[in-house]
Amino acid sequence: MSDHRSRGFSLIEALVASLLVAIAVVGLAHLVTVGVAQAFMTRQSATALTLAQAKLEQLRGLEWRFDVKGARVGSAQLETSPPSALLEDHDGYVEALDRFGTLSPPGETPHFRRRWAIAPLTAPDPDTLRLQVCVYSTGRPGAAADICVWTVRTRKP
């Protein structure tokens, strides 16, 4: 006489195995979803950082020096900005950019908004400027900047 229990799986064993596989698949799907979201956020942050650094370098490249007679020489683009230039759009201190970092055509919804502020580092020294650039994702209105960078620029004799 043979034992019927040793011939295969019982229905309960098959259900338990199926449940374990289903739990593993759901867990893996969640990990994939989290990974994709994290990769998107990392890409967004890296793009914002690149856009902020590019503008900062553009501002650093503008003329800001003393001439041979000691007179101050400076680009009009380095004029002191309004105090709220990093928080609100002010002409001459904001750019709307597409997802590739180029200027958005009028009428199109920008992907990023880049704002910058220019101010003397200290009140009595008009020859040292603090340059700040912040980049905001336009998909999150009212949110804090994705990235802000700054540097100091001094006139050299």
Image (cartoon, grey):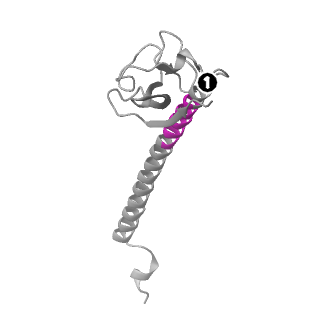
Is 86 or 32 nearer to us in this picture?
Answer: 86
Decide: few, some or many residues near mark 1? Use Cα within 10 Å; few <14, some 14-19, many ≥20: some
Residue 39 higher or lower than 120, as above or below: below
Q: In the figure, is residue 119 to the left or right of 49? A: left
Which secondary structure dominates the residues rendered in magenta? helix
Residue 92 higher or lower than 51, as above or below: above
Q: Which region shows up in magenta? A: 42-56
Q: Is residue 17 magenta?
A: no
Q: Residue at the location (36% across, 29% down)?
A: 140
Residue type, mark 1 in image: Phe
Percent across and percent down for residue 51 are 55, 31
Q: Residue at the location (50% across, 45% down)?
A: 39
Residue 147 higher or lower than 67, as above or below: below
Percent across and percent down for residue 149 are 48, 37
Q: Which residue is mark 1?
A: 66
Q: State the SS at label 1.
A: strand
Q: Residue at the location (48% across, 45% down)?
A: 36
Q: Quadrant of the C terminus?
A: top right
Could one spot residue 92 in this view of the protein?
Answer: yes
Q: Quadrant of the N terminus?
A: bottom left
Q: Is residue 49 magenta?
A: yes
Percent across and percent down for residue 97 are 52, 22
Could one spot residue 136 in this view of the protein?
Answer: no
**Picture mark count:** 1
